[in-house]
Image: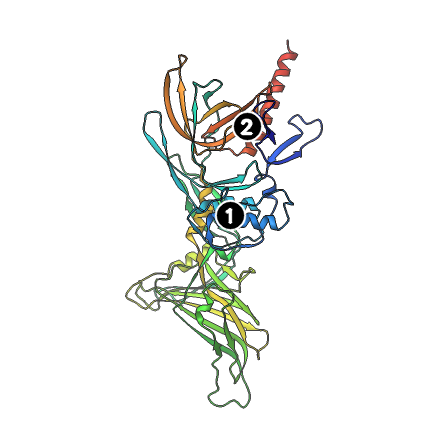
Amino acid sequence: MQYRTSTTGPWLNKYAGTAVITGSARSEVGRYKLQGFRYRRLTEVEVRTLLAEADLGAQVRQLFTDVIASGQLGSTLQAPTVGTIPDLNITSAAIQGNFWPAAKLIDERLKGRSRQTRTYLNPDGSTQAKDVNPDWGVNADLRPVFGFPTGTLVIDEIVTGVEIDGMDTDSSTLVTDVRVVFAQTLAAQGLENAADGTGNRRYQDVKSPLTYPISVAPRRFGEAWRGLPLPVDVSLFQRLPASNAQAFATGFIRQGAPNPPNTTPTVTGNWSALWDGDALSAVTIGPPPDVTVSSYTVQLLFSDATPLPDGWEAKVTGGSISQLTVEARDGLVPPIGGSHTASATVNGPNTPTGVALLGDTTRARLAGAWTQGGNWSSGKTVYIQITPVDPQQPVVLSAGTLVRANPALLAASATPLARIPTLNPVTARLPGWNYSPAAMAQLTLRDALGNAVETRELPIELLVYDTDDDGELYTEVRCGQRDEAEALSFTSAISARDQNATTDAVQAST
């Protein structure tokens, strides 16, 4: 969409998006709706490639470059540049596209990886700080943009046509805590021993989600929660290195084997390949010369400082992961007829990435014995059982270790969802459309005689370009408005319909 400031002036770009037909020809809300690329097309196209670790700005540029190259957008979107998506001097971990909608991946996974604190001026001269994440979209020239708005838009009621008013809007939206949910987990079974002489207790837990509660905003207005489901993506998890590893073979001793038979499997490669995250490094485990192998078991020992895991990552070729077990022995509780222990066993990974997760219930059982230090024997051990396709052929294990969700990445996913009420929101109406996005507005209110009443600075949440009933262009600068443009557009249409209905009713009664 284009506009010009005079009948003879040049046409200027102001909006890039799509016009869609909504409803029937008799719709009272309006049949045509303009939708920006961010809210329309970029929610429909998917990210198909791995975004390698890089500066956050470079990573977002790569995302748009890959989406454009995929052909999903035709020839509409222009290539990103360093000018529209600058480097942000923050290293962003690699993230797999996994066919997420482009807009969703940016909003829920990338925006939260950067944050800035800005200071604003109150009417009484005091200041307040506000943390903000980068914003993004597609500008009027069809270029993707991502980063932090800059500059200050000076708005003064002494200028003809400028009006500053309080804004009647629902500023009560509140999200102080986010519960990240991984629903794709496995049912588990195992043993618990409380070290009180009562012996082992077997349990069998049904499948339950793995959740992480994350505080994203102060609770000074109250406590409010929102759920954030995330896929079981290996890029969201940290691999925990083992301190020692060995392999065993189980099977049938071949006839004529010497006594004692050689039952030790051959191992080629460095055990660190199981937790280095490199898909090209691996450990090859071959059958012993005197055994027809039915299964291999890889035993991993972990240091006392290893954090409580969420599950495992295990990937094998030439065989299948038949069982995964983790055991913990508590060194803080004195043994009375046994050690304080807990174990959890699942039947193999359930995702293509090889990640197998425990639910909250089972993880809590394990947590009771997953301690550090103490005066008694402690330990943390993992067993990976592998069934070979061919007992005479080796298996290749490219991953095999404990994993836990990366706290920094979970926080990055959850933080953009924070919402706290904005007190005393303000809207300013300016003549024309010749205003560009800025970080903040400096607003000067004046009395009827033109004397300054107060000056304050507020963050700009939204710019609305509109026309009045006479076709005159004007811009609304909304400070403290947290509703998204799509919701505002629909709300505006509904309000206009209701106003027309009221006017019709009044006219009909007179």
x and y, in percent, of residue 193 in the image: 39, 64
Q: Quadrant of the C terminus?
A: top right
The residue to which callout 1 is attached is 60
Quarter residue 368 falls in: bottom left
- Residue at the outermost left position: 375
Relative vertical location of residue 305 with respect to residue 408 in this rendering, above or below: below
Disc 2 designates what residue?
Answer: 465
Q: Nearer the viewer, residue 110 or 274?
A: 110
Q: Position of residue 268 (x, y in %)?
A: 48, 76
Whether residue 24 sits left or right of residue 226 in the image: it is right
Residue at 51%, 30% in the rendered image: 463
Q: Earlier in the sequence, mark 1 or mark 2?
A: 1
Element type where label 1 sits in the image: helix
459 in relation to 509, above or below: below
Residue 441 in picture, x, y percent from top left: 43, 29
Residue 11, position in %: x, y? 60, 29
Residues tagged 1 and 2 counted as in contact (Cβ below 8 A): no
Can residue 167 be seen from the camera position used here? no
Give the residue displayed 35% in from the left and 68% down from the top: 338
Compare residues 459 and 267 and report the one nearer the observer: 459
Density class for disc 1 (Cα within 10 Å; few <14, some 14-19, many ≥20) is many
Asked whether residue 11 is in view, the answer is: yes
**What's the amino acid at mark 2?**
Tyr
Q: Secondary structure at mark 2?
A: strand
C-alpha gap between disc 1 and disc 2 = 27 Å
Q: For the point 56% across and 49% down, which residue is it?
A: 65
Q: Which quadrant of the rendered structure holds the N terminus?
A: top right
